[in-house]
Amino acid sequence: MNIRLRDILKDGENALILGVGAILALFIMTTAIISAYSIRENSRQDWTQQLENLTLTIAEQASQELQVANKALDSIALEIKNAKIDDERQFREFAGKESQFTFLLHKTASTPLINVAAYVDKRGDILNYTRAYPAPKISIADRDYFLIAQNNTTDETFYSVPVQNRTDNTWVFYLSKKITNRNGELLGLAVIGISAEVFSQFYQNVVSNLGAGASISLYRKDLTLMTRWPFIEGAIGQKKTDSPTAKIINDLKLTNGVIQSASNTVEQPESGRMVAARVVKNYPFVVSAEVSDSTVLKNWENNEKWIWISAAASLIILALSISLLLKANRAVNKELLERITAQRELTKAHEKLETRVKERTVELTKEIADRKLAQEELARLNTYIAEVSHRAGMSEVANSVIHNVGNALNSINVAVSTINAEIKSSPLATLPKISEMLKQHSGNLSDFLSNDEKGQKLPKLIELLSEQWQIENVTLISETKQLKESVEHIREIVSRQQSLSGKMGIDENINISDLINNCLSFYVTNFKNAHIIVSMDNEPNLEWIGDRSKITQILLNLIMNAEESLLACQSQPKTLKITSYNNKNDGIQIEVADNGLGIEPAVLNKLFGYGFTTKPFGHGLGLHASAIAANEMEGTLQAFSAGKDKGATFILSLPRKVITETNA
């Protein structure tokens, strides 16, 4: 210990300053270490929660997609069951029909997830499938789902290992269900193929938000990899019993969880990772999401750097402060007298400060009152803005009604002008003159009509006026009828506008024919101006109980799309046909068909996707929302078209909740 340090320590106050400085330095270092560790743990906890939420989302997505596929598979198996087939020959004949090809297409057309649907006989030969009719000679006798079906004693759905499809080489895993006769003998299989790449594309969109090295996988319950992103063909179909996902599901016996793994991956060969896994509800599948430690700890690493920089800066400041305190302490005694004098000055300054504080308090009180007034004015403005927004919305509704009323008023104006012109130009104005002439010769009327030149012309003139009156009478009756219909149309516009609204979520007894007429009434003028021929074929007294708002939303969207397609095409005549009837599944079916632009085959599978549109200024929400509304009513919305410029048909199928007798 050098002499200078001994001198410093001799002074008790200096020793106290150094001791406090050492404690503060230790506190700064301890705080930095605890903060770095706390932020690291918080970062891991945040990512743990994010991954749990992510696996919940993708598990729900997988559950919904598998539910759709299983419903389609059950429907296909039920079709065979309802046919009451007893032997293999009957099964082959029934399953190979073109009507069954159409049935398979109908069941799978609106679901992009389904790659293929097929009937397979008990020898493994494909009898019919959705890719072509008639089906080519293809055997799937070597596939695991076919081999399992030979020995399986249950009718449960089997989920196969993913394989490359023999037709287009895409990766597909299959849902299969045994088809048996009434004696329980195996006739064949109903098969639906689910595209592994559709799942992978969805996972790609999710992974883009998780950082480099992240991945999402879908496993079968036995940990066979069904699909993943990034998509690695060599890994698809392989069992991953030594993976972190296996540890969560098999070793820890959890239905969902998150663990830290030190093992490397293809994407991150030099980094550990955080792995989350979750069992898909109601289905033998597991979803898994992985992110690298570099992503999880990225924010922590940035914060840690600033923690240590702050700690170093604090230590430097502390050292400088202690140095300054030591120097100041040596001058304490010398400055003591000066401080007494300074204390007096400080007292005076304190008094001045109190005066200033009081003045400032008054200013702040006034400022607070002004702010309160400003807040009240802001609240008033917000209320006014809300009222204006409401009025703007009401104005849009009024504009729609006024547009339809304006069209009817144009018809009224034309009818009134025609009646006015007909009356002004009518030759019947000469009748008073004829009457006056007959009065003048009432005493010798017979002689006047027989011998007078003017009298001889009167019968012919009256005959001509009678004929003219009949012509004018027909015209005036026709225009008066048109005038009455236009006035009635104005009244109906408002009532139909109200009747179409309904109450969201409330089931009502709806007359389908009336509903279609009401929907079409909003486009009558447009159809007339565009020379579009509208026809309807509605089953009489067809009624349905359900949500009026949802079915109205779907019909208005389909009619509007048909109108736009017909306006954009060159075909003549332009036709729109709407058909409604009871279908064979004890439900109702509504078809909207046009001969407009048509739909290309490549577009059909994407038509109901979120955000997909073929219109230059479209938003891609109409058909997507309509399909969702149909699903919410436990129905389906499908689109069919022979191709470009060959028109399109949209079919809405809805189940019947309650069968209601229609009163005669």
Image (tube, helix red, strand yellow):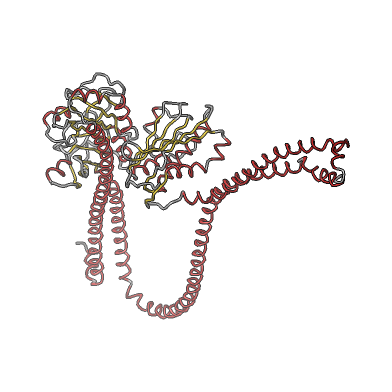
Compared to 653, does 344 lie above or below? below
Q: Residue 431: horizontal and vertical position, in percent?
A: 79, 43
184 relative position to 25: left or right = left
Q: Residue at x 56, y 50 (%)?
A: 491
Q: Residue 650: horizontal and vertical position, in percent?
A: 41, 35
104 relative position to 580: left or right = left
Residue 610: image quadrant is top left
Q: Nearer the viewer, residue 484 or 332?
A: 484
Q: Nearer the viewer, residue 291 or 196?
A: 196
Q: Residue 234: horizontal and vertical position, in percent?
A: 21, 28
Q: Residue 252: horizontal and vertical position, in percent?
A: 13, 46
Q: Residue at x 76, y 36 (%)?
A: 463
620 relative position to 160: left or right = right
What is the tally of numbered marks visible in this picture?
A: 0
The quarter of the rendered structure image containing the N terminus is bottom left
Q: Nearer the viewer, residue 69 or 88?
A: 88
260 relative position to 405: left or right = left
Residue 578: image quadrant is top left
Q: Nearer the viewer, residue 222 or 343?
A: 222
Q: Residue at x 85, y 42 (%)?
A: 445
Compared to 308, does 277 lie above or below? above
**Extreme residue toward the right, this view:** 452
